Image (cartoon, grey):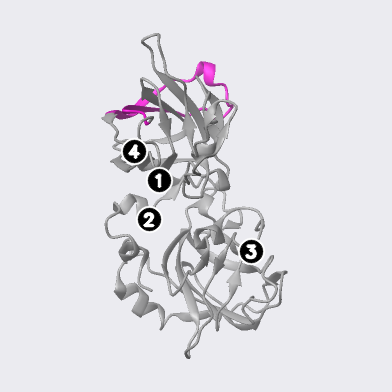
Amino acid sequence: MPSIESLNPDTPLFARTGINLASAGLGAQAVAASDEFFAPLERMLHDSAPVFVEGKFDDHGKWMDGWETQRRRDGGNDHAVIKLAAAGRILGFDIDTSHFTGNFAPACMIEACTQSDGNLDAATWVPVLPHRPLGPNAHHFFKCESYESWTHLRLNIFPDGGIARLRVYGVPELDTIADGREIDLVSALNGGRVLAVSDAHYGDYMRLLAPGRGLNMGDGWETRRRREPGYDWMILALGARGRIGRVVVDTAHFKGNFPPRCSIQAADMKNFGDGLTDALITDSMFWNMLLPEVSLGPDQLHDFTAELAEFGPVTHVRFNIIPDGGVSRLRLYGRPE
C-alpha cells in the first residue's frame, strides 16, 4: 500500500497529514452546548465513522449519530464548545453532515480561544473560520488561516440542526522541547504521524500512536494474513527531531494474531520536507537499524532499551512487523533535540 497521501487523493492535504485535535480517542472533550435535544454533543467527537440505523428511535425521536439540536423558533442560533485534545495550531476542518439530510445545519462559523485554566468565562473568542454554507450528507473541508495555538473551539451553527462529526486537523503544540525532558516522540499528542503503511486491513492504524492502552483488538494496527513472502511495515514521522532511547511495543488484546518479531529502522530526514512521496518509502528500505529484529509475545508490553543501537537524532522511523499481525501501541521515548 502506498503513502497516506495517495490513500485519499480527493481529501485535502491537511486532512491526510494533520492530527485530529477534536478526537475523543485522543482526549478531546465536549464542554457545553446550547441544545442537545435530539443527539448529544459528545457523539460529534467520536473517532468512528457516523452510521445510520434504520428504524432506531429514542424518547426524543430518530436516533442520529452526531450532535443535533431541536428546531429553533426564536431567531437565534445554536453553538457548542469543545476542548481540544491538545493545544495546537489548526490547519483545517472537516465538518461532516453524513446521514443528516433534512435536518443538517445549513451554515456554520467557528471561533477559538486559548485558556489553559479552563475558565471560559474570561476567554476571548477569535473567529478562525468565517461563515460557511453546509449541505446535506457530505464532508465539508475548510482550510484554517490562523497560525496561533488554540485550546478550545466554539462551533456555531445557523440556525439549528445536526452535525455528524467535527474533525479539527492540526499540529499539537510541543512545549517540552525547551527543557529537554524525555517524551514519547511518536505520540499523536506530540505531533507523531503515520506517513505510509504496507497494509491496514483491520482496526484503526492511527490508534497505534494514541495515548493509553488499546481497548480491544480493533483499537490498533492489524494487517491481513500474508500469503506471500515479505513482511508488513509502517513509516512514521516523529513529532520532533530527537534521540530515541527506549522503545515500547504493546500487543494488548492481540493473542492469536500478534507479530512474532519486529524491528525498527530510523533516519534523520530533516531536509526532506513533509516527505509524503514514494521516494520516502523506497528510501526507508535502506535506513539504518535502530532496533534489530526482536521477538514479541501475545497481549503484553515489550520494553526495549539495551537492544537499541547507538544512534544520533532522527526524524522518521520504519516499524517492521514480521511477517504480519497486530500491534496495539508503539512508544518511542527520547529527548527532543
Q: Secondary structure at mark 4?
A: loop
- The disc, 1 or 4, on the residue closer to the chain's N-terminal end is 4
Q: Which residue is mark 2?
A: 17
Task: Find the distance from the CA under tag 2 to the CA under tag 1.
Answer: 8 Å
Q: Amino acid at mark 2?
A: Thr
Residue 236: tell me if it is visible: yes
Label 2–label 1 contact, CB within 8 A:
yes
Please provide percent x and percent y for residue 172.
Answer: 47, 46
Q: Amino acid at mark 3?
A: Met
Q: Which residue range is magenta in the image?
A: 104-131
- The disc, 2 or 3, on the residue closer to the chain's N-terminal end is 2
Q: Amino acid at mark 1?
A: Tyr
Task: Find the distance from the CA under tag 3 to the CA under tag 4.
Answer: 38 Å
Q: Which residue is mark 1?
A: 169
Characterize the local packing of mark 2: few (<14), some (14-19) or many (20 or more) Cα atoms within 10 angstroms. some
Residue drawn at 55 percent across, 62 percent down = 208
Q: Secondary structure at mark 2?
A: helix
